[in-house]
Every structure is written in C-alpha cells, then in structure tokens.
Image: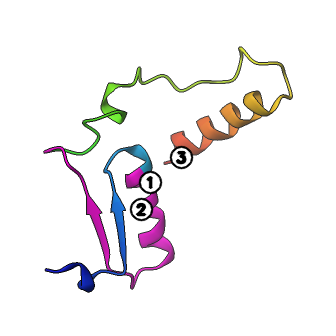
Amino acid sequence: MGSSHFDLTIIGAGIIGLATAMEMAERYPRVKLLLLEKENQIARHQTGHNSGVIHGGIYYKPGSLKAETCVVGRKALLEL
C-alpha cells in the first residue's frame, strides 16, 4: 500500500508514538493512520531502555512547574 493511502503517518512506536497514534485514532476514527517503527517490536529503542520509574515530583519545590508536571503526568500515565 503506497503512502497516498494514509492520511497520517507517525514515525516511531515508542511511548510517544503509540500514545499519539492512540489519541489520533480516538479523536479521528476515520483517519487512515500509518505507524512506522524501525525495530522488530514496539518500545524497543529509547522507551524500552528507560528505568520504568514514574516520577511523583517529590524532589522538586512544591508548586513548581516541574512538581506539577510530574503529578499530572503520573496520573495521566496511570490512567493510560
């Protein structure tokens, strides 16, 4: 199937690429989406090499952007 058969192409099937593809598919169910990955499995590059830690923001100044981002991001990741 040639590229003209797709409306959107996402390059990379790590956490960002997969989350983006999922969101786009939910928001625009009629969009023909192509997800490309160079590895033989998903999440095998950078995503597959992280520590797996979900940061809670406890090391940052309370109320700081970093702390708030960690709290919001942790909640979103757990919901995902």
Residue 58 sits in quarter: top right
Q: Disc 2 on helix, strand or loop?
A: helix
Q: Which residue is mark 2?
A: 22
Q: Are marks 3 and 2 in contact (CB under 8 Å)?
A: no
x and y, in percent, of residue 71 in the image: 69, 33
Disc 3/disc 2 C-alpha distance (Å)? 14 Å
Q: Which residue is mark 1?
A: 19
26 or 14, nearer to the observer: 14
Q: Are marks 2 and 1 in contact (CB under 8 Å)?
A: yes
Q: Disc 3 on helix, strand or loop?
A: helix
What range is drawn magenta here?
17-40
Left or right: 29, with 72 as reference point: left
Q: Name the residue: 39% across, 25% down.
A: 50
Q: Is residue 24 above or below residue 28?
A: above
Q: Disc 1 on helix, strand or loop?
A: helix
74 or 35, nearer to the observer: 35
Disc sitting over residue 79 in the figure: 3
x and y, in percent, of residue 4 in the image: 26, 85
x and y, in percent, of residue 32 in the image: 32, 80
Q: Name the residue: 41% across, 80% down.
A: 29
Crowd class of label 2 (few under 14; some 14 to 19; many from 20; radius 10 Å): few
Instruction: Confirm whether the magenta stretch covers residue 18.
Output: yes
Look at the image and tell me in which quarter the N terminus lies.
Answer: bottom left
Left or right: 35, with 78 as reference point: left
Crowd class of label 1 (few under 14; some 14 to 19; many from 20; radius 10 Å): few
**Closer to the N terminus: mark 3 or mark 1?**
1
Q: Amino acid at mark 1?
A: Ala
Residue 11 sits in quarter: bottom left
Disc sitting over residue 73 in the figure: none
